[in-house]
Amino acid sequence: MIRINLLRNQFGSTVGIRPAPSHLDLDFDSQESFAVQGRSRKPLWIALAAGVVVAAGVGAWFALDPMGEETVPPASAHTSTPLPVAKDSAKSVVAPDSTPKPAAVALSKEDSAKLAAQAKKAREDSLKLAKASAAEQKLALEKARKDSIASAKARIADSIAQAKASAAERKLAMEKARKDSIAAAKEAAVREKAAAAQRRQDSLAAVRERAQREKQAAADAAAAKSRAASVTASVPAVRAPAVVAPPLAGGVVNLVLTEAKSAAGKSIVASRFEDLIPTGRIAYQRFAFEQILNKLRQVTPGNGIGFSRVRVLSPGVLVLEGEAQSAAVLADLARGLTAQSLLDTSSSLSSDGRFLLTARLPFSASAVASASLSQDFSKDLQKGLDLASSQGIDFSRPGSARTSDTRPFRRAAWKLSGTGSWEGVSRWMGTLAASGSALGFTALELTAGPDGKIKIAATAIAYGK
């Protein structure tokens, strides 16, 4: 029976769906017929052990089953109904021997024991492999985690280092830009200072050169006059001059005419400022303004009085505004001005100490002189401003000149404003007169300003053809 079942299981039908096993089949397979999938073989070995146990139970049942009428399983899958064997036909039909053989039973038990041992060993191997695989997976996961943490730390460290490097680079760039800007500003200031100094030097050189040319022209004109006079004296009166004097150098005629006008003006004793020619008025205004500033500085008391505004008007009027501690201090100032020939002094003092004082410098015919005529108003104004800059006076850029015709000359006027010192303004007036400048003034105002400086406002004029 066992052999038939084994043969049927091995060489049975090849139909895709296997029939349901009978309770008489020893249904077991070898180890090689199981498909092992995945890393763990534990389910495989458990199924194999279960099959071995079932086979052992079936074999034991057959060994202990009593003799009797049995139903023989069909040899083919097509005839599954068992055929009964009648007792009456025992004499004519020989019944097969249903008693299990001891050799087959022993072989079945030995095979079952071997399969059980193999199943146990396979289960133990599977458990070992599963434990080893779990340990390997744990180690791999731990290593992957550590590698990930190390990589993340490395990336963070790299980003921090890059951020620090970028910040350091930006700081260095900003520091370099700041140093470059400071160096550029210093260099520009040095260049501007050198250019201003060069302009002042050029202006002074031009003034000296012009004065030299004028002096040389005057000498040439005098020599030409003397030569012409000698030639005229040597020729008889009844005859025309036989020798004609050579032509004069350029500009000599204008210079001679100017000197002639100046000589004619000096020959007339002027008793009033209004009697002077325009160039004489400019020269006298500069003289009077310089004298008033110097005398006011000499007679001002050291304590007890302060000026808020000082105005000097043409031809020699002084107007003072300020504060005095007492009427006695103001009287001392008025007496000092009178002693310096500033006559017609009148003053007023309010209850809060504010005063207003007016004085006048009398006209002096001995101080009459003549200034030069301007050939170019803009150039003469720039020269005058350069002289002021050399005395520490900073004027803002003036506007365009206002010109008018005062026959036989043209008159130009400018409004000047800037800052400086009392001494600088006084020296500036003297420098203009010494350099032969054509620039004069009709009004000068000094006002107290910030940082100990004086605000300066002036109306400058010049005459030209």
Image (cartoon, rainbow, N blue to C red):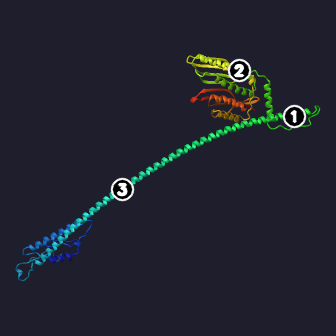
Identify residue type, mark 3: Ala
Which disc, if any, is residue 228?
1
Label pair 3/2, CB-CB below 8 angstroms: no
Nearer the N terminus, badge 3 or badge 2? Answer: 3
Q: Residues within 10 Å of mark 1 (few under 14, many from 20)?
A: some
* Front one among 457 and 228: 228
Q: Quick one: SS at disc 1?
A: helix
- 386 shown above or below 104: above
Disc 2/disc 1 C-alpha distance (Å): 44 Å
Q: Nearer the viewer, residue 64 or 293?
A: 293
Decide: few, some or many residues near mark 3? Use Cα within 10 Å; few <14, some 14-19, many ≥20.
few
User: Pointer 2: what residue?
Assistant: 362
Distance Cα–Cα, label 3 vs label 2: 102 Å
Residue 140 in the figure: left or right of residue 85: right
Q: Is residue 177 above or below residue 126?
A: above
**How far apart are labels 3 and 1 at the CA level?**
114 Å
Q: Is residue 437 visible?
A: no
Quadrant of residue 354 within the rendered picture: top right
Residue type highlighted by circle 1? Ala
Amino acid at the residue labelled 2: Pro
Which residue is label 3 attached to?
150
Q: Quadrant of residue 86?
A: bottom left
Seen in the picture, residue 310 relative to 140 is either above or below; the reply is above
Query: Residue 121: image x %, image y %?
Result: 20, 69
- Which residue appears at 87% of the width and 37% of the height? 245
Q: Residues within 10 Å of mark 2 (few under 14, many from 20)?
A: some
Q: Position of residue 178 (x, y in %)?
A: 52, 44
